[in-house]
Structure formats: C-alpha cells, structure tokens
Amino acid sequence: MSTGRGHGLGASAQRAAVGFLQAATDAYPTVNTGARLAQSYGDELGLFSTAFTYDNALAIIALLADGKRSSEQTARVLGDGLLYAQDHDPGYSDGRLRQGYNVGPYTFYDGNPQPYGFVQPDGTANIGWQFGFLGTAVGDMAWPGIALLHLYDRTRDRRYLAGAVRIGEWITTNTWRTTGLGGFSFGVNGANAPVPNGSTEHNIDCTAFFSMLRKVTRDNRWKEAAAHAREFVDAMWEPSEGFFWTGTNDGVEINRFPVPLDTVTWAWLATRDRTFKRGLDWAGTALAVTDDAAAATSQLPDGEMVSGVTFSTASAQSTAQYNGITVHPQGVWLEGTGQLATALIDRNGRGDAKAADRLLAQVRHAQDVLGVGQHLGGVVVDGGVVAASSLLDTGFGFGYFQVQHVGATSWFVYAATRTNPLDWLKRS
C-alpha cells in the first residue's frame, strides 16, 4: 500500500490544500509579478500552463473561506487577474472572459513556443489559443461573477463589484433566450458565434449569481434575470427520479442523457429549495462508485481503495479511451465528491453530517496517496486533490485524470470549512 504524503486530517489537510492553491497561483514567478491566474492542473496532464477561468473562480472563494490573511491576499491577486483579463482582452472590450488563459511559457506539441506569462508584451491577456480555449460560456462567466462578489463582500473594493456587474451585463445581453425552453444559452465560441446549447448547470450558476447581484446592488434587473434562469432550471427537474436533465442541445428539445452530478449538488447550494433536496440522495446512490486497485482499469497504487461519486450516469458505463488509456467505470470524481460533501453539510438533515464526513475522509485519503511527485511549472507540488482517482469519462466528450487540480482542491476546501459558495448572501 502506498504510504502517501502524510497530510493527516482536519486542519493540516486544509493547510496543504490551500498551499497547493497558492503554489498554482505563483507557479511562474519570473513572468507573473502582478495580477495573474492559477494554473489549473499539474504539468502531468499535458495542458501546460492553462488556467481555466472556472477553476480560478473556485480558488478565489476557497481562499477566502480559508480565512487566513495570506489566503485573502492570494484571492485578491486572482481577482485582480480576472479584472485584468476583462480589461485587456485582445479582441473585445465587453467584459467577457475566455474559457482559459496561458500563464507561463511552454513549447507546444507541434514545436511552436508560447513564451509569455499571463500578460503579453503588448499588455493583452494571454488567451488560450493553442488549445482553442477561446470561447465564452455562461458558466465560465457566472462563477467568476460570484467569486468577484465574494471578494467585494470581504474587501469592499468596488472594482470587484464593477467587474461582476460587467459579467452580468454580458450574460444578459448575449445569451438571454426567449424562444423554446428559454433560459440562458451556452455562450459563444472563439469566433464569437452563438452556441445554441442550454445547460442546466449554467442556469443554476446564473440563478445564484443574479440573486447575489440583486442583493448587493438592489437593482431589479438582476431579480428578473435570476427568475429567467430559475424558470429553465425548474423545467429540467425530473420529479419522479429526483434529478435534473442536463439541458438542451438546440434550445427546444431536452437532452436526457447523460445525467450529471453537479446539477443536483449546485441546485441545492444555489436555492436551498426543498423540492430539490432529494437530488442529493439520488446522487449518493445512483452515482456511487468505489475504485479498487485490484480492478483491471484502475490506476490506483497497489492495495488502495477510494470511494465517492462519479461524474454522470454515463461514467459508470463507459469503455472510452483517452490518450490510449481505457477509462475506469468505477473511477471517483474527487471534485464531485467534494461537491456532494459540501451540499450534504449545507442540507444538514438526518445522517447528512456523517455521510459528508465519510466522503471527506475519502478525499483526504486521495490527497494523501494520489498525485505524489507531480509538478506545477516544473516544480514539485504537494497538497492538491487529483481530479479523479482513475481516468474516468464524463459522457460529455472529455475525461478526468489522476492529476492534481485546482477545482477539486477548492471543493475540498469548501467542505472542510463548511462553506456554501453559492448561497452566502441569503444568510446575511
């Protein structure tokens, strides 16, 4: 059995996770001396210095939840990075954020160099052009908006509020749909062409984000926007089963497969609507998996076992391959396991605390034994939670690997600190 890294339990595991988020932020100190973003994954994933906008939004909220002064300082650095990206996009001045950015030098697979950090020599933000991470999705806007509102609440720096308002204006101007199933459409691709999909997850994000904006600004346009998103979310609820359909591919017909985890966890965290509380029970049963090193497609070290939940109803059935590796149907999605623990803690029903503690114990074990010796910017890094215990297929055309991940680590911090990232203003 692997001896791991010995982070222990409780506060020491949380400190190690926060240390990973800070290391991801500071991975390229010679080229990023001001506002910047955090590299999302360890180098071993092969995305080089890619910083996904969603992951950085999660990191900001997690660092603020940690509560340490040094953590708040790192959160502000990342928040300033989001504002810089808004103000210095190479093609647009409408407040959009791209799916991802480059934050450090690398040589691409075709031999072409990417020599810059987050800020290019002409002052523009270094968008993720080599991998094609150029589009702007509603979820990749709403989560940064939520993060900026968290920063505004903590610091009262009105720059963060202004950035959040610009995000809200971009979403409502560019993706408000009045036909078919309504709600907010997916966003735009890198060529600025509309993407007709409508995501339940994204509309949950918008429900939370616009509700927060309404609370802070007292501007009723955000109340209307939140209601518009919520109407789409309600239409995706499947009451007989207790889950949400994933959304729509064309704005008209409901997409009924696969069914993802994050819609049920986020819907509870965003609304606390008792109608949706059953979704957590569905997820804890229908998406439960146990990764055992003895299985042929498991990537766990010998003798190890990790339990939790997977990404979707397709994940446990998949035989897909990524990079020539066959996925493991029982691979644990560690980010989602952190999400479910966070939601159960927040629901606080009978048995929820114990169930959440069991999930958290599994994430802490994964933090200890998986991802050992991985790197950020070529430097060995510690304390991060890997995206998945073994390679898994989401069912949406991409997989998650056993590589340390800012997103998975952030959700672990939420659960460890009993933080609901989507509902904090409703408690004030």
Image (tube, grey):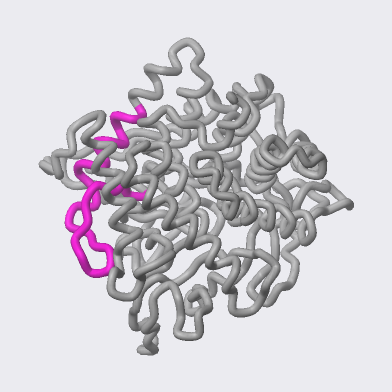
Q: Position of residue 197 (x, y in %)?
A: 72, 57
Q: How many marks?
A: 0
Q: Is residue 223 magenta?
A: no
Q: Is residue 376 magenta?
A: yes
- Position of residue 349 relative to residue 132, above or below, is above
Which residue is drawn at the image coordinates 63% and 74% (left, top)?
A: 190
Counting from the top left corner in percent of width and height, residue 292 is at 27, 39
Residue 282 visible in the current orientation: yes
Q: Is residue 2 above or below residue 276?
A: below
Q: Nearer the viewer, residue 101 or 334?
A: 101
Q: Along the line of sight, which residue is nearer the eye, 78 or 269? A: 78
Specify whether 279 is left or right of 289: right
Q: Residue at x 38, y 42 (%)?
A: 334
Quarter residue 324 falls in: bottom left
Residue 261: tell me if it is visible.
no
Farthest residue to the top: give it. 350
Which residue lies most toward the right here?
179
Above or below, 381 relative to 2 = below
Image position of 41 (left or right of 202): left
The residue drawn where x is 20% and y is 65% is 379
Where on the picture, by quarter, is residue 223? Answer: top right
Q: Please state the extent of the stretch shown in magenta in the rendering.
A: 359-387
Which quadrant of the figure contains the C terminus?
Answer: top right
Foreground residue among 212 and 191: 212
Identify the residue at image location x=34%, y=64%: 45
- In the displayed structure, 169 sits above or below 111; it is above
Q: Position of residue 322 (x, y in %)?
A: 40, 63
